Image (cartoon, grey):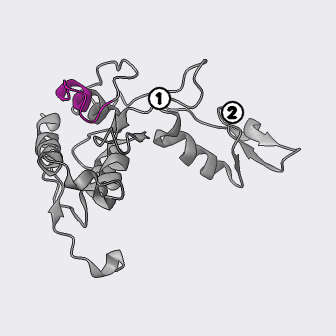
């Protein structure tokens, strides 16, 4: 069934007034910086790591600096920005410096650079670290870049993770804590 036929009944956990068809979609809304609350993916990553002492869903890599508060919106996380110098005459496309992926437009390359793909890239780890993992470590253990990606993985349930005790409660607890980050 397409998303246009599913009722959006999951409210944004910050109370911004928007509603979504899945926890994944609600978390993506927060991670993308599209919520009026000012929550960012970096802020979510920091606090989820802080709350997940047992490592149920986080990998423990890398060490994360404390993010700015939501109130200080002028201090957004540093982002990579491509310029016309990214054009590769050989490939006839814009080329990502980190992973050599090719893009037909500069806008597409900058969207790629703003995504989670290179959030935690370093000079020795150009792919970046994956902060989350499937809690079904014995059957799956897949490592995932974003919390929204983990929620999508859980919602799909292909690895049997949804049948594990405590998973649904953990998602509910995570979503319930998002409103605390806006303070």
Identify the secondary structure beneath mark 1.
loop
Circle 2 Cα neighbour tier, 10 Å, few/some/many (<14 / 14–19 / ≥20)? few
First in residue order: circle 2 vs circle 1: 2
Range of residues picked out in magenta: 47-58
Say whether residue 73 is left or right of residue 86. Answer: left
Q: Does residue 120 show up magenta in the picture?
A: no
Instruction: Residue at 25%, 67% (x, y): give it.
Output: 21
Q: Estimate the spatial distance between the alpha carbons at disc 2 and disc 1, rounded to whole Å.
A: 17 Å
Say whether residue 89 is left or right of residue 26. Answer: right
Circle 1 Cα neighbour tier, 10 Å, few/some/many (<14 / 14–19 / ≥20)? many
Q: Nearer the viewer, mark 2 or mark 1?
A: 1
User: What residue is pinned by disc 2?
Assistant: 97
Above or below, 7 against 107 in this view is below
Q: Quadrant of the C terminus?
A: top left
Relative image position of residue 18 (x, y in whole percent): 21, 61
Relative image position of residue 78 (x, y in whole percent): 46, 27
Say whether residue 154 is left or right of residue 110. Answer: left
Above or below, 141 against 63 in this view is below
Relative image position of residue 159 (x, y in whole percent): 35, 53
Say whether residue 41 is left or right of residue 162. Answer: right
Identify the secondary structure beneath mark 2.
loop
Instruction: Residue at 55%, 21% (x, y): give it.
Output: 122
Relative image position of residue 94 (x, y in whole percent): 73, 45
Res. 129 mark: 1
């Amino acid at each position: 069934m397409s998303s246009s036929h599913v009722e959006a009944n999951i409210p944004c956990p910050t109370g911004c007034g928007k509603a979504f068809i899945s926890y994944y979609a609600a978390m993506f809304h927060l991670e993308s910086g599209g919520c009026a609350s000012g929550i960012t993916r970096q802020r979510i990553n920091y606090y989820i790591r802080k709350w997940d002492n047992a490592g149920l869903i986080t990998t423990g890599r890398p060490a994360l600096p404390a993010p700015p508060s939501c109130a200080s919106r002028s201090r957004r996380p540093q982002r990579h920005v491509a310029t016309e110098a990214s054009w590769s005459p050989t490939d006839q496309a814009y080329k990502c410096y980190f992973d050599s992926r090719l893009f037909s437009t500069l806008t597409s390359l900058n969207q790629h650079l703003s995504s989670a793909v290179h959030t935690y890239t370093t000079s020795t780890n150009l792919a970046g670290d994956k902060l989350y993992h499937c809690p079904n470590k014995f059957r799956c253990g897949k490592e995932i870049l974003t919390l929204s990606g983990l929620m999508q993985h859980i919602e799909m349930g292909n690895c049997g993770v949804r049948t594990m005790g405590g998973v649904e409660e953990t998602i509910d607890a995570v979503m319930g804590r998002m409103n605390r980050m806006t303070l």
